[in-house]
Amino acid sequence: MSFKLCLVNPMATSLPVIDIYEPLSLVALGTYLHHAGVLVKIVDESIGEDVFNEVEAFEPDLVGFTATTYTYPRAVFLGNQVKQKGFCTVIGGVHVSALPEQAIQDGFDMVVVGEGEKMLLEIVEKGYKRGIFKPTADMILSESEIPFLDKTLIKLERYTKFSKKSVLQGDFLGTHLLGMRGCPHKCIFCYNSGRQYPLRILSAKRIFAEVKNTIEVTGIRHIVFHDDNFFVSRQRVKEFCQLVIQEKLKFTWACSARSGSVDEETISLAADSGCRRIGFGFESGSQQVLDRMEKGLSVEQNLAAARLCHQYKIELLAYMIVGNPGEQVKDIMLTKKFIKKASPDYASVTRLCPYPGTVLWKWCEDEGYIHHIDFKKLNFRDADIQIPGTFSPSVVGKIRMQLFLWSCWVLPKMRKRLVRGIFRQLSVFFMVLICRYSYRPTKK
Ligand code: B12
Ligand code: SF4
């Protein structure tokens, strides 16, 4: 009988917004191991699945958990419960890649640091039972080794239903793909500043082929690329858009990008090939703040990108951050001015949060600001950690809320979207409840 692997996505219990996303890390791992002959089951708490019941019914040889910082506490709880029932556990993902020893202390049998596919396969094949594992350089996947994401491993219709109701994702019924791993930049707050595996940028041809395949398999014609910066190479974007146009592939798409990577030629081609929305990490309207974040961009570049999106009728999502190192009232005023000028369709205002493994985390640690941390309260809304040279954590919380409300006030499109968003959130809330209560346990 073949090896049975159960992969679990724990729910983010502490975040206020209900957004349900395909667990791409687990789909990537599951696809790779499935191709190698492993029997894979993905269980996702966020769509109402009961982890204990699913694990008991599947009787896996190994249970793997993924975790970001805000889902880590829940992963620890579930991991220990599953272990008590006699199952062996492994955990991976950005949070434990930074703090692997703590995951062992918290009860997991094994931890994988960094990219998981080949390391997990080795764990399965060699029957490892305990320890911290880090893939060696030859265990990092090359472009040709990264398989197309197998969406049949998840209950895709559950996620697409939610995606149409998401405040951020908007009106499209979409599915998600990945065209790169990592980013060449190292903004101090981002996981890329401490990333453990090398950057890989998939070619335009490869992405086009995966889009075509995904449309054929799922029938879904809106693709959200979760690349850190889809425009990372202008040549790649141009080639990709030209392929879409030449081959007359009818679909719409959305992505995230860095303002410094876009220009008129790429944005106009993107619009022609079906791009409907781009999210930019503008972060701040103050050049000093951008420089302290090591963003490597100017306020002017950010404004130019915003103008191009408006010109080519691509919906603009602006990611803004408050509570940055050295940030003062004058910088917040500059951010307000920037938001007004950029006039995005939606401004996501979050607080700077030092996540483990980032340069910012190390900085806060060196300054003596990291004490006992409750990871449940470390996210874009709560973070009880002092950031060097700026307001206290509680004041940052208030500024975030004020800036968010102010943005709603000055951005009519955002206001409209938020009103719709509130109703959508309510309907998502009821959909989640329905999912939970209509959940039928898998029988043994
Ligand atoms: C797509 C994405 C989103 C999407 C969807 C999130 C989702 N739930 O899928 C959106 C836009 C909604 C989003 C939102 C947020 N995100 Co986000 N997001 C990402 C992004 C860009 C890609 C994630 C991904 O799919 N990667 C591709 C997979 C293949 O890589 P991976 O996850 O690292 O998995 C590999 C390894 O880690 C390992 N691995 C992972 N799990 C496991 C499990 C096992 C058993 C094993 C062996 C190995 C293993 O193997 C995998 C394959 O090689 C990442 C950055 C990044 N590129 O990873 C940030 C990232 C995960 N997000 C982050 C944050 C902070 C957020 C927000 C809180 C933003 C905010 N405002 O502050 C919100 C939270 C929303 C929510 N409710 O979850 C942080 C998390 C930091 C942390 N320590 O927790 C990241 C790392 C970016 C950053 N700022 O540094 N995000
Ligand atoms: S450009 Fe974006 S993805 Fe790249 S390091 Fe900076 S914040 Fe992270």
Image: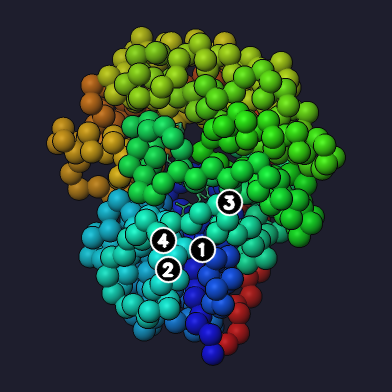
- The yes-or-no answer for disc 3 within 8 Å of ligand 1 is yes
**Residue appearing at x 27%, y 39% in the figure:** 361
Rendering quarter of residue 323: top left
Earlier in the chain: of badge 4 and badge 1, it is: 1
The disc label shown at residue 139, or none: 4
Earlier in the chain: of badge 3 and badge 4, it is: 3
Say which amino acid is labelled 4. Met
Q: Are marks 3 and 4 in contact (CB under 8 Å)?
A: no
Q: Which residue is mark 2?
A: 120
Earlier in the chain: of badge 2 and badge 4, it is: 2
Say which amino acid is labelled 1. Leu
Q: Which residue is mark 3?
A: 21
**Residue appearing at x 66%, y 37% in the figure:** 254
* Image coords of residue 143 (percent x, y): 55, 52
Q: Which residue is mark 1?
A: 29
355 is higher (above) or lower (below) than 336: below
Mark 3, residues whose alpha carbon is within 10 Å: few (<14), some, or many (≥20)? some
Earlier in the chain: of badge 3 and badge 2, it is: 3
Mark 2, residues whose alpha carbon is within 10 Å: few (<14), some, or many (≥20)? many
Q: Are marks 3 and 2 in contact (CB under 8 Å)?
A: no
Disc 1 to disc 3, C-alpha distance: 16 Å
Say which amino acid is labelled 3. Tyr
The disc label shown at residue 129, or none: none
Earlier in the chain: of badge 2 and badge 1, it is: 1
Q: Are marks 2 and 1 in contact (CB under 8 Å)?
A: yes
Q: Secondary structure at mark 4?
A: helix
